[in-house]
């Protein structure tokens, strides 16, 4: 029973832990993506056409990392027929642009194009007033922060569930030990019965085992009655055999000549 309870607890903890992990990872990732979406919208709202029809930003995005080389935060604007407009943090690198699809809505995905640095990229296409070009706006951030948050959450989650599992198993063990304590008391009383130290279980027992104790006492009383009836029957039988045996012994002692028929007669009486 204890092993079944422990197995059931482990199953519930693993299932619950996996479900909670999925919820937490999804929530943290969504928050990270919301930040990218905010930066992407800010970049689109700040975009305007330059003298040559190219895109320029009328104000820089409020994140110092976009100005630092290989900082893990990048943005890029590209359009067909125009030179790509990157953030300073990209330096001589460029984000890949897949023109085979139209990102009318925000498209967020993972990329390993700057390996070993993993990126989370949000991109969207937009048409600026006065331009017929479909511009691709992209904002990328390193997954290091996101993966670090996920790792911290998972470590905390695993430790918490391990402690919870240990606590539940200890509780089940204590509950089983305490629950079986009345049965151990009953066993001790039965041992006293078998040793002849008591005639019945007289100590008060918990309500959980009281009916069983009553049945045991009834069984003991029934066995005692049967034993008493057997002793009484044996006494009656011994008394019934005593007279014929005395007659046979007296006849044998007197050396009677007709002892044979007399023995047969008394033997029939004993039967």
Image (spheres, rainbow, N blue to C red):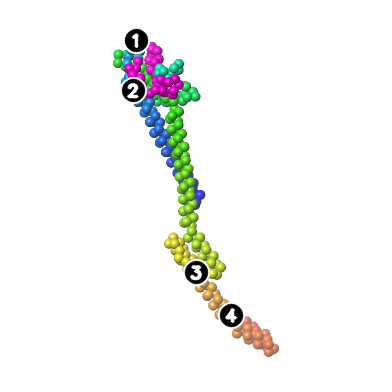
Sooner in the amino-acid sequence: mark 1 or mark 4: 1
Task: Give the CA separation, mark 4 to mark 3.
Answer: 30 Å
Looking at the image, the residue that sits furthest to the left is 129
**Displayed quadrant of residue 54:** top left
Query: Is 94 drawn above or below residue 154 in the view shown?
Result: above
Disc 2 designates what residue?
42
Mark closer to the chain start, 2 or 3: 2
- Which residue carries the number 3 mark? 200
Q: Which residues are magenta?
A: 56-85
Q: Quick one: label 3, few (<14), some, or many (20+) residues within 10 Å?
A: some
Task: Tell us which disc is closer to us: 4 or 3.
Answer: 3
Q: Residue beneath label 4, please?
A: 238
Residue density around tag 1, few if under 14, some if 14–19, many if 20 or more, within 10 Å: few
Mark 1 falls on what kind of element?
loop
Where's the C terminus, which quadrant? Answer: bottom right
Instruction: Please tell me which residue is depicted at 48% across the width and 46% down the height of the picture.
Output: 166
Is residue 44 left or right of 170 when viewed as pictured?
left
- Closer to us: 123 or 250: 123
Q: Looking at the rendering, which quadrant does residue 49 occupy?
A: top left
Q: Earlier in the sequence, mark 2 or mark 1?
A: 2
SS category of the residue bearing label 4: helix
């Amino acid at each position: 029973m204890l092993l079944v309870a422990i197995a059931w607890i482990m199953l519930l903890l693993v299932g619950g832990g996996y479900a909670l992990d999925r919820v937490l990872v999804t929530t943290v990732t969504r928050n990270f993506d919301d930040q990218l979406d905010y930066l992407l919208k800010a970049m689109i709202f700040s975009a305007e056409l330059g003298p040559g029809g190219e895109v320029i930003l009328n104000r820089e995005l409020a994140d110092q990392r976009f100005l630092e080389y290989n900082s893990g935060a990048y943005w890029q604007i590209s359009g067909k027929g125009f030179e790509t407009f990157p953030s300073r943090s990209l330096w001589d690198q460029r984000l890949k642009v897949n023109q085979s699809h139209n990102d009318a809505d925000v498209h967020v995905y993972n990329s390993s194009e700057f390996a070993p640095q993993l990126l989370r990229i949000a991109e969207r296409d937009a048409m600026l007033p006065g331009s017929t070009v479909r511009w691709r706006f992209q904002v990328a951030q390193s997954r290091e922060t996101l993966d670090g948050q996920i790792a911290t959450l998972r470590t905390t989650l695993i430790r918490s569930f391990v402690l919870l599992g240990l606590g539940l198993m200890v509780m089940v063990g204590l509950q089983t030990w305490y629950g079986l304590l009345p049965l151990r008391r009953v066993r001790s009383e039965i041992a006293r019965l078998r040793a002849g130290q008591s005639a019945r279980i007289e100590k008060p027992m918990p309500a959980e085992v009281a009916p069983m104790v009553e049945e045991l006492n009834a069984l003991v009383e029934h066995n005692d009655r049967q034993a008493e009836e057997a002793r009484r029957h044996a006494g009656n039988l011994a008394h019934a055999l005593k007279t014929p045996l005395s007659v046979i012994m007296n006849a044998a002692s007197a050396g009677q000549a007709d002892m044979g028929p007399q023995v047969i007669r008394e033997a029939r009486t004993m039967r």
